[in-house]
Amino acid sequence: MVYLDNAATSWPKPEAVYSSVNRFMKTCCANPGRSAHQMARVSSNIIMKTREALASLFNIPNPLDIAFTANATHALNMAIQGVLRQGDHVVTTVMEHNSVLRPLWHLKHKGLIDYSIVMPYDSCGNVSPGSIAGAIRPNTRLIVLSSASNVTGTILPYKEVGEIAAEKGILFLVDAAQGSGVLNFDVQAMNISLLAFPGHKGLMGPQGTGGLYVAPGVEMRPVLFGGTGSRSFETIHPEFMPDVVEAGTLNSPGIAGLGAGVQWLMDVGLERIREKKKLLLESFFGAMDHIPSVRIYSERDAGKNSGIISLIIPGMDSSDIGNILDKKYGIAVRSGFHCAPLAHEALGTMKTGLVRISPGYFNAVQEMEYAAMAIRQITGGR
Ligand SMILES: Cc1ncc(COP(=O)(O)O)c(C=O)c1O
């Protein structure tokens, strides 16, 4: 199997991730933050180490401002539903995933909030910071922006938008689902108030992991209520980090694996990760030059692309192409709509969808060349 579906979940993982999960399960899988015995303390320490590794990666001063979640969707819901109040307005873009669009739609449908959705200006899904600034109203409390589109890989202007948000005193939520593990995030320098990230994509952790950073001073209300191991006699769920987000027992084995993934990432360095992705993208794009009939919706310049090539062969449905790649060539990609309906509407691909090819650090150039050869054969040489 040639695995080119890393934008959905990265695979394979660094060896240290497998061994960390295994070791944790076998030796210290007690409940962290609840009991005070020796095994629970070891478990708590490992959870804290993962918080510290993430804090170092994102330049977060206090690791306790990071809460663990089950995935990016969970983190985005906690952020959106936790900070918005009756009468608030939100600015976001058509390039967002349903894990942003659906919670916003839900709050709007309940009559609580309103939002404006900004359009991209080209077929790669680029969005201008000026159009985001232009959508701000006096009651805008929050701007939500993906760091990179999961449909096209286009890196969105989160640095510039952070400056706009800070200038206007508006909260800024970054969906780092596609950017984390590839792009630089410095929550302090980039004025990021809330950073939602999955653990199972670029951060190399297991599925069932993710997290939310909440900047000091951001008023979060709980969305999920329950045990936190703190203030047990109070009926009100704690409103301090990380307990406000972390109701119930954590996915400790997964978080142990995530810690190993983040440590591996920092040892390799984001620069090397980006260089490898550049090499893989360029080898594929080079091969595509000889197949003019294929329509590509991703930036060729790797500096503008988080690591995705989305394409369609005119006259074919993306799911048929995905099926042929899987069954005939043993290549795993994601075809369809990528949970981003508005992006596909804006790009004009809502009838066929797109084939999304997303290599990871462990892919080889030869695998990209093989995928390009398979696409060429599927086009029938057109
Ligand atoms: C941009 C973006 N946001 C959010 C998500 C949701 O992530 P998760 O599957 O971890 O909930 C994804 C998943 O693909 C994504 O690409």
Image: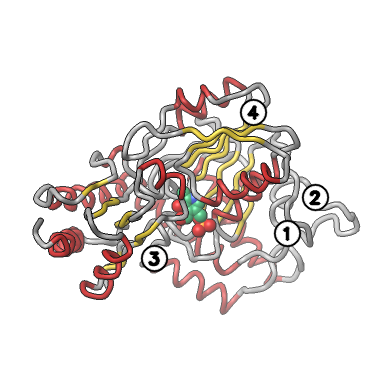
- In front: mark 2 or mark 4? 4
373 lies above or below 151: below
Image-based side of 261 in relation to 335, left or right: right
138 or 208: which is nearer to us?
138
Q: Is residue 310 left or right of residue 38?
A: left
Marks 3 and 2 sit apart, C-alpha to C-alpha, by: 35 Å
The reply to whether residue 263 is visible in this rendering is no
Q: Quadrant of residue 371?
A: bottom left
In the rendered image, the quadrant that contains the N terminus is bottom left
Mark 4 or mark 3, which is nearer the start of the sequence? 3
Which residue in the protein does label 2 denote?
A: 238
Residue 375 coordinates in the image, percent (x, y): 18, 61
Please tell me how crowded label 4 is: few (under 14), some (14-19), or many (20+) other residues with Cα within 10 Å.
many
Hey, what amino acid is under mark 4?
Thr
Residue, disc 1: 247
Q: Secondary structure at mark 3?
A: loop
Residue 11 sits in quarter: bottom left
Q: Is residue 235 visible?
A: yes
Q: How is the image coloured?
A: secondary structure
User: What secondary structure is marked by label 4?
Assistant: strand
Q: Which residue in the structure is indicated by mark 3?
A: 13
Find the distance from the CA under tag 4 to the CA under tag 1.
29 Å
Could you tell which of marks 2 and 4 lies nearer the N-terminus? 4
Rendered residue at 40%/41% (across/down): 346
Dot 2 surroundings within 10 Å: few (below 14), some, or many (20 or more)? many
The residue lying toward the viewer, choosing from 305 and 262, is 305
The residue where tag 4 is placed is 140
Q: Amino acid at mark 1?
A: Ala
Q: Earlier in the sequence, mark 1 or mark 2?
A: 2
Q: Tell me the kind of residue under disc 2.
A: Pro
From the image, state whether disc 3 or disc 4 is nearer to you. 4
